[in-house]
Amino acid sequence: MYQTNESLWTDEHRIFRQTVRSFLAAEVEPHIDEWAEQHAVPRGFWRKAAEAGLLGVDVPEEYGGPGGDFLHRLVIAEEIGYSPAGAVMAPSLIADGTCEILYRSANEEQRRKYLPAMVRGELLFGLAITEPDSGSDVSATRTVAQREGDEYVITGAKTYISQASVADAFMVVARTGEAPGAKGLSMIVVEADRPGFRRGRALKKMGVVASNTGEIAFDEVRVPVSNLLGEEGRGMALCLGGVNMDRITWPLIAHAASTRALEETIAFVKNRKAFGQTIFDFQNTQFRLAEMKTELAVGRAFLDDVIRDYQANGQLDTLKCAMAKMWLPEMEARIMDMCVQLHGGAGYMEEYPISRFYTAARLHRIFAGTAEIMRLIVSRSL
């Protein structure tokens, strides 16, 4: 059981945590081997997640949501990070954050059109930003949405897109104007059943293998201008509007996963014997475990500080979120590596949870903003 700082949460959040924990234990963890083999999460998972109240947690009731807050999303992040399920499918469940993006970016008509079905698990959205030639540098986007009367004609390609093979619609970042860089970008909803839309390869990954990731392409796909989210030229702003939320979500996942990895390792070394004693009895083992426990305590204190800032001010501190996204996944990498080492050969076997935690952790230094981009942001404050 993940031990979080109880003072951060209300009774409502604590009850919700139990709901998330029970759902993962009953509906996800028994199936992770099967889903890992299939490289996909079944469609029915989303309806079950909706029935449990895990989708669109911060969507207001008037749009079919439970009317929670961002802290409910952080509860989900902690629990999915701590669960072995997170090591095979965390990005899929966290991708439900598209609800938050759409609510924040959409007009009233769009909210009523999309959000209720998203909260019910009937309409799956993907966020289509990354391209073959542009990852962290969104301003280099080459996908074009040319306006023709009351329609946009979209041409281009996206890659490393979560939910690429299964999403019903995508929020696509495309170039709508002649302005250079980010100033010419907009965000447009593209339904997957429109002529010219193509799903490409489902990409195979070293970790989180049940989380669908793939390629999509647009060959003169026509969508109505009413599918534009916000205003033309505001695409980058819409992307950045939730960036701090991503930058604190994934450090929380990293911390929770590291905590579970340490617990699994302590249990393993206390039972594994070598040279007439348990692995735990060796002073080297005890020292390494002590170092990891200390790093986790330091990381948790910083995360708690970021969350308290949010509770006090209603917004996340950009600099602290960048620091968290930079440091926590790198801390996780150190811990995962040592945990595998203390498992010995068993740590390289997929039957032990640490193997999947290890490969999943490698994504966290890249996903939602690389460690290098976070260093750039932090350095600007010096």
Image (cartoon, grey):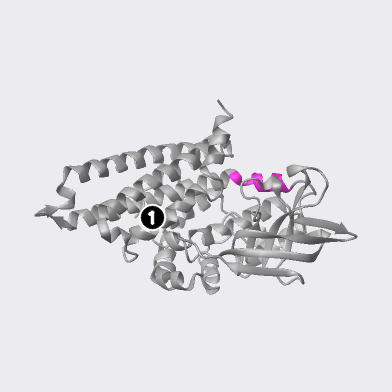
User: Residue at 80% of width from left, 65% of height from top?
Assistant: 220
Q: Residue extending furthest top?
A: 382
The stretch drawn in magenta includes residue 256: no
Which quarter of the figure has residue 188?
A: bottom right
- How many marks do you count on the picture? 1
In the depicted view, which residue is nearer to us: 273 or 74?
A: 273
207 to 6, vertically: above or below:
below
Residue at point 43%, 64% (across, down): 24
Q: Name the residue carrying label 1.
A: 358
Residue placed furthest toward the right: 149
Is residue 177 toward the left or the right of residue 335 in the image? right
* Percent coordinates x, y for residue 372 in the rendering: 53, 40
- Whether residue 10 appears in this view of the structure is no
In the image shown, does 10 or 204 lie closer to the viewer? Answer: 204
Which span is picked out in magenta? 235-243
* Residue 137 position within the rendered picture, expressed as x and y whole percent measured from the top left: 65, 45
Q: Is mark 1 on a helix, strand or loop?
A: helix
The kind of residue tagged 1 is Tyr
